[in-house]
Every structure is written in C-alpha cells, then in structure tokens.
Image: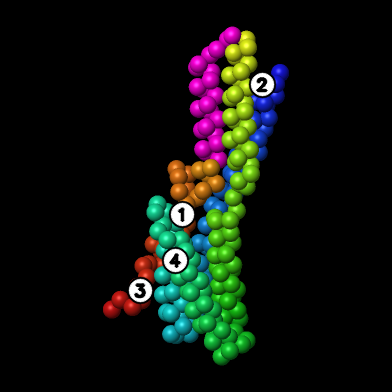
Amino acid sequence: MIVGSLLALMGFLLAITMGMAADRFDRRRSIVLEEANAIGTTYLRAGYLPEPASLEVQDLLREYVPLRIIAGDPGDISERIARASQIHKELWSIAEELARNNPESEVLALFIESLNQTIDLHETRIVAGIYSRVPHTILVLLIAGSLLTLAAMGYNSGLMQRRSSATAVLMIIVLGAVISLVVDIDRPQGGFLIVDQTPLIDLQEQIGPPGLSKTP
C-alpha cells in the first residue's frame, strides 16, 4: 500500500510539473510569433515615415531581427539583449523627433503604437525565456521523491523476496526520462527541445539582411 501510494503521488507530481513546463514552453513559442508580427508591422509602417527616418528605422529593424533569433548556439545572450535595448533607444529617439515635428500625424501614431508593442514584447520574451521557470523546489522534490519511491520498492521487494531487476531498471529509466524531459522543456536555450524560431527567420528573409539599404 505504501509503495502504491508513493507511485501515485509521484505520478501526480510529475503530471503537474510537466503541465507547468509545457505551459511555459507554449507561452515562449507564442511570444516568438507575436514578436515577429509586431516587428513586421513596425517595419511596414516605417515605410510611411518621411526620409531619412524611414530608411534609418528599417535598417535598425533589419539589424534587430537577427538578435531576436535564438537557435542553436546563440552566443552571449547578455550582449544580444544589450544591443537590442540600444536599438530600442535609437528607434524611440527617431520616433520622438518625428512626433515633435508632426504631433497630429495619424500615420506616425500607428508607427509609434507598433514600435511600443515591439519593445514591450522584447521584455516579455526575456521574462518568459530566462526568469519564468519551474521552481527549483519542485525539481528537488521530484528527484527526492523518485529516490524515495525506488528505495521503498527495493525494500518491499526484499521483504517479499520477489526481486525483479527488469522492473527496477524500467522504473529508473521512466522516472529519469520524465524528469529530464521536464528540465529540457524548462531550459529553452539548450537541450533537445527548443522554441521554434521560424516566424522570425521568415521575417528576416522578407525584410533582408542588415545594411541592405546602404548597398549601392
């Protein structure tokens, strides 16, 4: 009865933890799509701005998109975030200057709206990707609970003199695989399961590489 209760409790904890990790993973994936749409809208609306602001904004966005693509080995994340924040300041400076000269422009208001959404999604994605994780306490509880459950199964098998090596190995593999999967899903920068970057990659192909408008 005790072993059965421990197994049921472990199954319950694993299901809850997997649900938490999966929800966070889906949220990160949806933010990538939202960010790609926001950047694309900002890029298109920048075409309505007067020159040279239009070209400056589009060039900055072409440089910005590769910084937001986190696939494979992304390198130093802190450097990417710092450069992205610097681009935000440059874009906002351009928007402020235009707003002073054209305070009643509806087109400019639409551009500022999409730019503001782009900047907000940058911070949202940082929080979801770096700080929104399954609490370490739960992971420690899973590992400790797995060890306790396996120890109880071994002790019970010794008392009943019914040892099954295959069952023990199978339980170790299953529990280890599920916990490893939870950790892998919860760490989007590495591992086997990574957040799909296709929306941002497609956007980069549509708007072109950095410095495109400067090419003679």
Q: Quickly name the residue at label 3.
A: 211
Q: Are marks 1 and 3 in contact (CB under 8 Å)?
A: no
- The location of residue 36, given as percent across then percent down, is 50, 61
* Above or below, comparing residue 96 to residue 145 in the picture: below
Label 3 Cα neighbours within 10 Å, binned few <14 / some 14-19 / many ≥20: few
* Above or below, comparing residue 166 to residue 199 in the picture: above
Q: Quadrant of residue 153?
A: top right
The C terminus appears in which quarter of the rendering? bottom left
- What's the CA distance linking mark 4 and mark 1? 19 Å
Q: Quickly name the residue at label 2.
A: 3
| Main secondary structure type of the part rendered in magenta | helix
**Which comes sooner in the sequence, label 4 or label 2?**
2
The disc placed on residue 172 is: none
**Which comes sooner in the sequence, label 2 or label 3?**
2
Circle 2 or circle 3, nearest the eye: 2
The residue at the far top in this view is 161
In this rendered view, identify the residue nearer to me: 67 or 170: 170
Residue 163 sits inside the magenta stretch: yes
Q: What span is in magenta?
A: 161-182
Q: Amino acid at mark 4?
A: Glu
| Element type at mark 3 | loop
Q: Quickly name the residue at label 4.
A: 79
- The location of residue 141, given as percent across then percent down, is 63, 38
Q: Amino acid at mark 3?
A: Gly
- At horizontal 57% and vertical 80% (from top left) the residue drawn is 108
| Element type at mark 2 | helix
- The location of residue 85, given as percent across then percent down, is 51, 71
Label 4 Cα neighbours within 10 Å, binned few <14 / some 14-19 / many ≥20: few
**Which comes sooner in the sequence, label 1 or label 2?**
2
Circle 4 or circle 1, nearest the eye: 4
Q: Are marks 3 and 4 in contact (CB under 8 Å)?
A: no
